[in-house]
Image: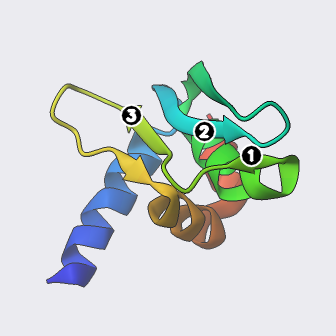
């Protein structure tokens, strides 16, 4: 069952990777202030969240919101998994 859910999410993300997304819950560790990142493609949002910790951000509470209302948001683990699995393919148009 879990595999089917992950496959459905992966399929939806790959299909919508060029669509718009917003990232909430990112903390800049230098200023200790939440940084909202909007108007970014879904693929780039996944890339950012998956790699943000090395850039000086705390993304433990981050979520990527994309797609139609009601689409489940992506959490840090989802982004790390999708980036590890698909990498640069998420950045292709």
Residue at mark 1 to residue at mark 2: CA–CA distance: 6 Å
Answer with mark 3 or mark 1, whichever residue precedes in sequence.
1
Categorize mark 1 by other alpha carbons within 10 Å: few (<14), some (14-19), many (20+): many
Asked which quadrant contains residue 9, the reply is: bottom left
Residue 4 vs 28, above or below: the answer is below
Residue 63, image x, y percentages: 44, 43
Residue at mark 3 to residue at mark 1: CA–CA distance: 18 Å
Residue at mark 1: 57
Residue ID at (58%, 47%) = 46
Nearest to viewer (mark 3 / mark 1): 1
Drawn side of residue 11 relative to residue 87, left or right: left
Marks 1/2 in contact by CB < 8 Å: the verdict is yes
Secondary structure found at label 3: strand
Residue 91, image x, y percentages: 67, 42
Answer with mark 1 or mark 2, whichever residue precedes in sequence.
2
Residue 82, image x, y percentages: 53, 63
Residue 92 visible within the image? no
Answer with mark 3 or mark 2, whichever residue precedes in sequence.
2
Residue 2 vs 52, above or below: the answer is below
Residue 21 vs 59, above or below: the answer is above
Residue at mark 2: 26
Residue at mark 3: 65
User: If the image is split into quadrants, where does the N terminus sit?
Assistant: bottom left
Categorize mark 2 by other alpha carbons within 10 Å: few (<14), some (14-19), many (20+): many
């Amino acid at each position: 069952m879990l595999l089917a859910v992950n496959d459905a999410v992966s399929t939806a993300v790959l299909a919508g990777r060029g669509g718009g997304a917003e990232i909430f819950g990112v903390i800049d560790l230098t200023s200790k202030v939440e940084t909202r990142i909007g108007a970014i493609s879904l693929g780039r949002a996944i890339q950012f969240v998956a790699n943000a910790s090395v850039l000086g951000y705390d993304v433990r509470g981050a979520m990527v919101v994309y797609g139609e209302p009601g689409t489940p948001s992506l959490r840090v683990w989802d982004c790390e998994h999708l980036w590890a699995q698909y990498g640069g393919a998420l950045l292709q148009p």
